[in-house]
Amino acid sequence: MPATLTIGDLSRATHLSVKTLRHYHSIDLLVPADVDGDTGYRRYTVDQIPTAQVIRRFRDLDMPLDQIRAVLQAPDLPTRNGLIAAHLASLEQSLARTQSAVASLRDLLAHPSAGAPVTHRRVSATAAAAITATVTMGELIPWYLGAFGELYATLDARGVRPAGPGGGLFASELWADERGEATLFVPVTAEIEPLGRVRPALVPGAELAVIVHAGSPANLDRSYGALGAYVSGHALQVDGPIREYYVVGRQETPDEGAWQTEIGWPVFSTGAAA
């Protein structure tokens, strides 16, 4: 029989606390080789040291305990490697988000005010193909990507060319309450029959204060902030959904640095030309 260790000895050998080892036993992640029926003392084999070390390293990589269990119980090497690769990919995505946030924060500290000018524009009512839903802030990005994909795919399948850049309407409740109505639309001149989530729509006309956001949407809030400050400072704000027009976006280029998004804030009529 392999040599055995007490839970204290295993703790010293693996740098896992006794409390942690007890927890791993309670969830059947690292089960002792033997538990004394009278005293409850746990004993582990030396063969379990490498397993404990693997668990510790996975925890250092923030892998959830249920995923670690799945890795340890994987029926074969390809399955195990696939689970590990999936977690590493998730870490890389998280790292990319962190790096983006750090770069954005440094830029904000170095250049605290957005310099894009604000203009006024009156937009006319526009026929469009649209998808509307009530979404949460957490759902917004995946919903946005899926809805625009469906819109453009539907138009392409019907041989309908967009009559202008796509856009979005976002109710104030979406920002204030983290849940509200959102509409994505693509202007068209042809009649559109309902298909899937796509419906014909008439995007209403509006008087807007407009700012152009250049580059990645990661810093979109800075342009929103500059526009909001302008509208408030000029006492122009009125109720109504915020608009975005994706003048240059993922449909035109994968290069986020080249993207241009027009943000429109509803304002009192100023008599500006369309």
Image: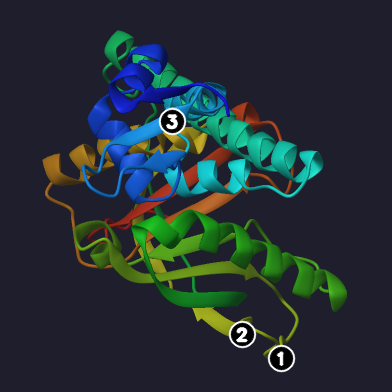
Q: From the viewer's perspective, tell me whether residue 259 is left or right of residue 75.
A: left
**Residue drawn at (73%, 65%) of the image:** 152
Residue 153 location in percent, x, y?
Answer: 78, 68
Place residue 50 in its image quadrant: top right
Give the farthest residue toward the top: 110
Q: Which mark is residue 167?
A: none
Would you call the spot at circle 1 few (<14 residues within 10 Å), some (14-19), or many (20 or more)? few
Tell me the CA gap for discs 3 and 1. 68 Å
Residue 155 showing in the rendered view: yes
Please name the residue shown 53% across and 46% down the image. 69
User: Which residue, given by chain and number where applicable, does mark 1 sit on?
Assistant: 193
| Disc with the residue nearer the chain's start (3 vs 1) | 3
User: Which residue lies under the disc numbered 3?
Assistant: 44
Query: Could you tell me which secondary element the residue under label 2 belongs to?
Result: strand
Q: Secondary structure at mark 3?
A: strand
**Could you tell me which secondary element the residue under label 1 belongs to?**
loop
Give the residue at mark 2.
200
- Residues 113 and 273: in front is 113
- For label 3, the crowd category at 10 Å Cα-Cα, with few meaning under 14, some 14 to 19 and many 20 or more, is many
Q: x and y percent of residue 7 in the render?
A: 32, 27
229 sits left or right of 95 in the view: left
- The residues bearing labels 2 and 1 have C-alpha atoms spaced at a distance of 7 Å
Foreground: 94 or 181?
A: 94
